[in-house]
Image (cartoon, rainbow, N blue to C red):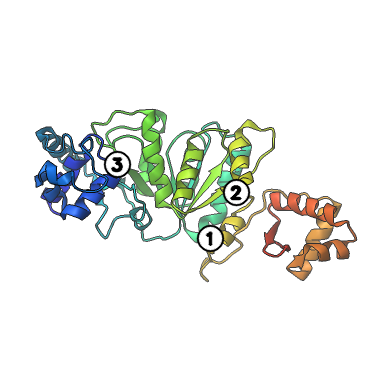
Amino acid sequence: MTTEKLLALLSLKKVSNLGDSSIKKLIREIGSAEAVLAEKKSNLLKIDGIGAVKVSDIHNPQHQRAAENELEFIKENNISYWVYDQDNYPDRLMHCVDSPVVLFSRGNINLNQKRVISVVGTRQITSYGQQFCQELIETLAPLNPIIVSGFAYGVDITAQKEAVKHNLQTIGCLAHGLNQIYPKSHKKYMAQIEGNGGFFTDFWSTDTFDRKNFLGRNRIIAGLSEATVVIESAGKGGSLVTAEIANSYNREVFAVPGRANDPLSQGCNMLIKTQQAHMLTSASDLVYMLNWELDEKSKKPVQKNLFLELDDHEKKIYDLLNANGKELLDSIALQCQMPTYKVASVLLNMELKGIVRPLPGKLFEAI
């Protein structure tokens, strides 16, 4: 990567109304970022989808000066940069049409580990959400996944602290430049996270913090990951936006169910009800859906039930499945001498408790 190419990319990023997708399109058509800046505006306007608004100030000399200043900041503060057409660029993010043409980072990020999940959710995390988040990451720890989040209050920081606790790499995606931190109270966690991963952003040192930046940050969270996990969310919120983006990228989305009348479970329950997310009741659900397997050195149970008390009906069904393996719904009802509608209801409760798993063809198995 030459300095000239980086400066050209940064200059294009400063052009008003010219987003990452359009920058990539211009480069594909013209050949390079440097060539785009040197091309006549009349020729750029001939490119399909590139209108006058997008290239109105593309030759503004102020963009070059701003790029030079940002490059100076990068060098002086030991900031790493990742360019979308380079081999070291995050592989999954590279396949997202609106991924950043330049991504900035700080810390010790190593993306050789292919298991990457994002964990997001409400800033007002409950004790239930906190326990689920901690036990989820603790149970997944033998699989050594990278944990991505937004470094915000609540679910985000809970997930990232738990990742550090279990010596897992964790990446915080920021909605501002690397010369600041939000929230300021999380500054005390920065050194730990940089030692076990680091921070990503595509915002510059000159970008002031603004809540509208969250949308851009959320696309990086979703794009980096194989799957996005939502742990507690109100009916509206940034975590639902992240889930929507992940779905648009054809990534897996998981949501933790909650009580029907719980405001902080409305978002998760809606994702599950509308089939925008898989129901997540235990780590084994995620391991099964993503087809993760332990290697022989670290192999141990990867599922940890959060709910251990079983009533008589649940115990009867669980004992049957545990002894026989996969069973059809009607077969369970026959062998347990229970009506089919009752078995279906009990199985749903057991699924919510994370002790049985539904399979195609109305089959069920114990976890």
The residue wearing badge 2 is 275
Labels 2, 3: front one: 2
Task: Say which residue appears at 10% left-offset and 44% top-offset.
Answer: 40
Label 1 SS: helix
Q: Say if mark 1 contacts mark 3, CB within 8 Å.
A: no
Type of amino acid at the residue the image marks with label 3:
Asp
Label 2 SS: loop
The residue wearing badge 1 is 290
Tell me: residue 34, above or below residue 73: below
Type of amino acid at the residue the image marks with label 1:
Leu
Q: CA distance from mark 1 to mark 3?
A: 28 Å
Examine the rendering and report whether any part of residue 103 can be seen: no
Say left or right for 51 vs 212: left
Say left or right for 301 vs 208: right
Instruction: Tell me where residue 37 appears, x and y as whole percent.
Output: 12, 44
The residue wearing badge 3 is 202
Q: Residues within 10 Å of mark 2 (few under 14, many from 20)?
A: few
Instruction: Tell me where residue 306 appears, x and y as whole percent.
Output: 67, 49
Tell me: residue 13, above or below residue 139: above
